Image (cartoon, helix red, strand yellow):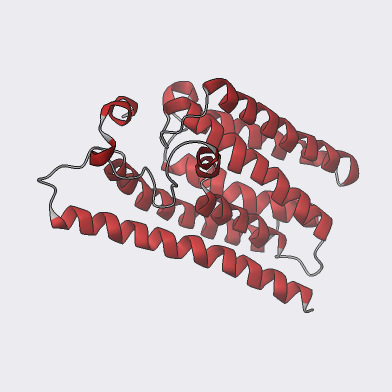
Amino acid sequence: MSQVLRTAPDSHRRPPAFYALAPGSWRDYINLLHLPYTCWHLSFVVFGSALVPALHLDRLLGCLLAFFLAVGIGAHSLDEFQGRPLGTRIPRGVLLALAGVSLTGSVALGGLAWVWVSPWIAPFIAAGVFLVLSYNLELAGGRFHNWFWFAVGWGVFPVLTASWVQTLEVTAAAVIASIAAFLLSAAQRTLSLPARRARRSPTQHSETAALQESLETCERALRLLSLALPLMAAALLLGLAAR
């Protein structure tokens, strides 16, 4: 796939994602963040944090920053390093540096929580590092690079972690919310995978209207969901603030 991206003429290629800016310069770094999807999964942090009678705002902000560093920057940098799915021109060394610094920052925030909240956060820190590295670097022959582990790492894990940081326990509400996040993340990957393949392959003159309509339908659903989930997260926070 990466070879196709390098050799196909620009006039015969779609942008690699519906949210991608024109390649080059600072735009590559914006594209690297996959902003609609990053906001989508940060919403799960808010969902987990909102399942409490009294919100610890400092813990929520810490979780949001930690997940932004680990997922928004770290995971996506490793993903781009692994196969250039966005076709950016960011040097491989810079991608590795971004991943290393962001993951270190995320772990450091976990270390602060270890001191100020509870040392029992250590398993969550270890699980987070494992999920980012195993999924995005396709370790163990890609055994963890599939829809199930994506839904666990990008759906279940943010909800359970954020909820536990607030309450220091795994509640029934958090388990139910994590299942919902699992299903939403699985739906995201189900919709995005065929759309990504279609966008990142050369367009063909013989491409049928049905295939184009299918791509547009998948991406319309992804656009709507990527707007709906952050709005729902904002509504939950406003509801907590009004109590």
Q: Is residue 4 visible in the rendered structure shown here?
A: yes
Instruction: Give the vertical position of 126 relative to 166 (above or below).
Output: above
Residue 62, position in %: x, y? 77, 49
Name which quarter of the figure residue 101 lies in: top right
Q: Measuring 62% from the left and 66% from the top, which residue is drawn there?
A: 233
Q: Measuring 45% from the left and 43% from the top, which residue is drawn there?
A: 148
Instruction: Give the vertical position of 177 relative to 241 (above or below).
Output: above
Q: Is 87 in front, or is 182?
A: 87
Q: Is residue 150 left or right of residue 85?
A: right
Q: Is residue 131 visible in the rendered structure shown here?
A: no
Figure disc tally: 0
Q: Is 96 in front, or is 149?
A: 96
Name which quarter of the figure residue 9 lies in: top left
Q: Is 63 in front, or is 79?
A: 79
Residue 72, position in %: x, y? 59, 43
Q: Is residue 221 left or right of residue 106?
A: left
Q: Is 9 in front, or is 51?
A: 9
Name which quarter of the figure residue 60 lies in: bottom right
Instruction: Give the vertical position of 165 relative to 10 (above or below).
Output: below
Q: Measuring 14% from the left and 57% from the top, which residue is drawn there?
A: 209
Quarter of the image where the C terminus is located: bottom right
Q: Is residue 130 left or right of residue 60?
A: left
Q: Measuring 70% from the left and 65% from the top, which residue is drawn there?
A: 51
Residue 205, position in %: x, y? 12, 45
Task: Please identify the residue farthest to the bottom as the structure is shown.
Answer: 242
Residue 99, position in %: x, y? 62, 30
Task: Please identify the residue farthest to the front as the structure is shown.
Answer: 25
Q: Is residue 108 left or right of residue 179?
A: right
Quarter of the image where the N terminus is located: top left
